[in-house]
Image: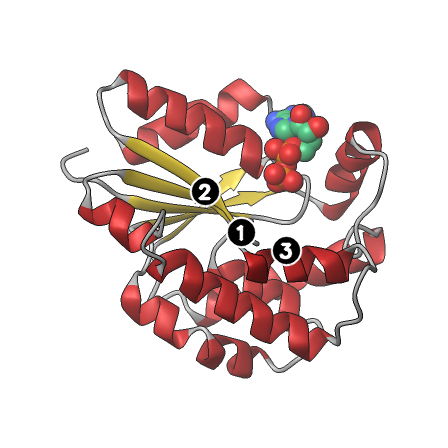
């Protein structure tokens, strides 16, 4: 790995993104890189509004959610405190748990995918991931993992919805395949096997 990279992890809920973000960060730090890990929705005021809608503390139409995610992402990139662009300019490799491919998949269950892509085009122009790592796992397996691991199911975490998002990810990746660097990693294996595949991709 020559320069500091921007890497986005993608996949349906429970696919193992946060697990692999952590392991990749540890590996790169051990190799001597400066690494900054982050996630979307962020913990900014905008991200907090999104979580409030998910947790039914605030009303929010799916179109509003899609627009809030686009705003949260721009803030994620541009803010002067811990913005991704600032971190990249400081020489960090930035690893994010979700980026705009997530929006393409999740919001297009409810709103036109081309609109979602357009609404996020400013983020894409500002910073395209050097690599999108899509962890591919069936909705059934992911639901099983989520059932084991969590008490409260979020708005999106039903099998029916996971199936729709899974299909939308496929549609989105096909649509943007000429613009984006996307690698698919088989996610229904052990944490270590997946982590090893990802190490080989990056290094
Ligand atoms: P995501 O961030 O994509 O929602 P997580 O990394 O939080 O997924 O993983 C969801 C759950 O599945 C967690 O309980 C985690 O410990 C477990 N998990 C993650 N990767 C694997 C794997 N390869 N095999 C089995 N369980 C896993």
Q: What is the distance, in whole Å, between disc 1 and disc 3 at their CAs? A: 7 Å
Mark toward the start of the polypeptide (1 vs 3)? 1
Label 1 with label 3: CB-CB less than 8 Å: no
Residue 163 visible, this angle:
no
Image height of 155 relative to 186, above or below:
below
In this rendering, the count of numbered labels is 3
Instruction: Name the residue rendered at 61%, 82% in the picture.
Output: 112
Pointer 1 local density, CA inside 10 Å: few below 14, some 14–19, many at least 20: some
Q: What is the distance, in whole Å, between disc 3 and disc 2 at their CAs? A: 15 Å
Viewed as shown, does residue 201 lie left or right of 76? left
Image height of 83 relative to 179, above or below:
above
Q: Position of residue 38 (x, y in %)?
A: 45, 42
Give the colour scheme of this rendering.
secondary structure
Instruction: Name the residue rendered at 19%, 33% in the picture.
Output: 1
State the residue position of label 3: 48
Image height of 43 relative to 190, above or below:
below
Label 2 with label 1: CB-CB less than 8 Å: yes
Image height of 24 relative to 84, above or below:
above
State the residue position of label 2: 38
SS type, badge 2: strand
């Amino acid at each position: 790995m020559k320069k500091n990279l921007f890497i986005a992890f993608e996949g349906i809920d429970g696919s193992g993104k946060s697990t692999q973000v952590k392991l990749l960060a540890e590996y790169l730090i051990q190799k001597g890189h400066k690494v900054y890990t982050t996630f979307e929705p962020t913990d900014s005021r905008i991200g907090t509004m999104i979580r409030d809608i998910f947790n039914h503390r605030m009303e929010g139409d799916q179109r509003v959610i899609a627009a809030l995610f686009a705003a949260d992402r721009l803030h994620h990139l541009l803010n002067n405190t811990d913005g991704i662009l600032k971190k990249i300019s400081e020489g960090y490799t930035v690893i994010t748990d979700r980026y705009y491919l997530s929006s393409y998949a999740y919001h297009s269950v409810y709103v036109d995918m081309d609109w979602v892509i357009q609404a996020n085009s400013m983020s894409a122009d500002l910073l395209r991931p050097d690599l999108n790592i899509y962890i591919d796992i069936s909705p059934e397996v992911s639901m099983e993992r989520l059932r084991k691991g969590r008490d409260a199911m979020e708005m999106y975490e039903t099998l029916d919805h996971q199936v729709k998002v899974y299909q939308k990810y496929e549609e989105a990746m096909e649509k943007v395949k000429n613009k984006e660097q996307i690698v698919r990693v088989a996610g229904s294996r052990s944490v270590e096997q997946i982590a090893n595949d990802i190490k080989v991709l990056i290094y």
